[in-house]
Amino acid sequence: MSWAAHDLEPYLIRIKVGAAISLPFCLIGSYSPDILTKWAVYGLDFSGDAKLTDDPVQLHRGWPGLGFTHSLAFGVVVGLLILLLTRNRMWSLSFVVGNWAHVLSDTLDSVGVMPLFPISTWHLHFDVWQYVGQVGRRGDAIAYYTSLGGVWDLLWASWLLWHWRTLTTAHFDREIAPKDPFWPWLHRRAGAAATLTVYRASAFFGLASIIGWLVWSLLVNDVQAALDWSLGGPQWAPRVGPP
Ligand SMILES: [Zn+2]
């Protein structure tokens, strides 16, 4: 899985695709596969170590399990529901794009996703880094941020920082708010400051997560703190493939 890249990808998609994309719905799409699954992989007691399931890989990415959340069809089905409920094509399309970005990103680990579900339960996985979700949040973070996964997150963070102007108030007022009815709607209810905060929240959360987890993984944790940027790393982590 990738960690904070999912928080940042929608901003870059919005920058590259422009007004065809609603950032909030793209973000909801990007969050959706893991919101529906990761709580059970890591557990709900916030210690990060409680397991709610015996087979996290099967539950997170498999079938039977919740792996259908990481398929192209899932994004389309929910996107159509959004279209039915809101009659807004941009919102619907943005959800699909955000969801697909997540699904494609998750092909980079050793478990991968079922892109063609329900036609096939075949897993697409490129093995760039190990899937380590089954060992709990802390071990997963250490493995991810010391491997090429950390590089993946850093690439997205650097790319967004390169485009830091998109996060300014002036850019929001000129380019974002007038082109998506979500923002005027929120502004009427919550005011200007809250609306801007919502706009920047995921970028701030993603960047802070990447910096925090990287520093913690490399400098604080005493389990395994060496960088391993080999393909399929880190090599010390248990090997896990598709369920
Ligand atoms: Zn995922």
Image (spheres, grey):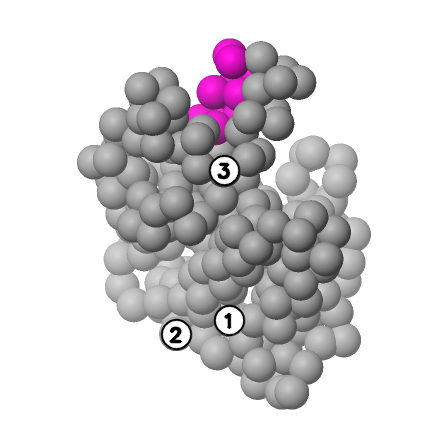
Tell me if I can see residue 180 in this picture.
Answer: yes
Mark-to-mark CA distance, 2 and 1:
7 Å
Q: Measured along the vertical axis of the image, is residue 235 above or below residue 225?
A: below
Q: Who is closer to the viewer here, 12 or 175? A: 175
Instruction: Give, as a three-letter code, the residue at label 3.
Output: Asp
Q: Residue furthest left?
A: 162
Residue depicted at 48% across the width and 41% down the height: 23
Query: Tag 3 or tag 2, which sits nearer the N-term?
Result: 2
Is-magenta flag for residue 199?
A: yes
The residue wearing badge 3 is 180
Q: Who is closer to the viewer here, 172 or 219? A: 172
Mark-to-mark CA distance, 2 and 3:
36 Å
Instruction: Give, as a three-letter code, the residue at label 1.
Output: Gly
The residue wearing badge 2 is 126
User: Mark 1: few, some, or many residues within 10 Å (few <14, many ≥20)?
Assistant: many
The residue wearing badge 1 is 112
Query: Tag 3 or tag 1, which sits nearer the N-term?
Result: 1
Q: Secondary structure at mark 2?
A: loop
Instruction: Give, as a three-letter code, the residue at label 2.
Output: Phe
Q: Secondary structure at mark 3?
A: loop
Of tags 1 and 3, the one toward the viewer is 3
Q: Horizontal and vertical percent for residue 59?
A: 71, 65
Q: Which residues are magenta?
A: 192-201
Is-magenta flag for residue 50?
A: no
Left or right: 176 in relation to 188: left
Q: Secondary structure at mark 1?
A: loop
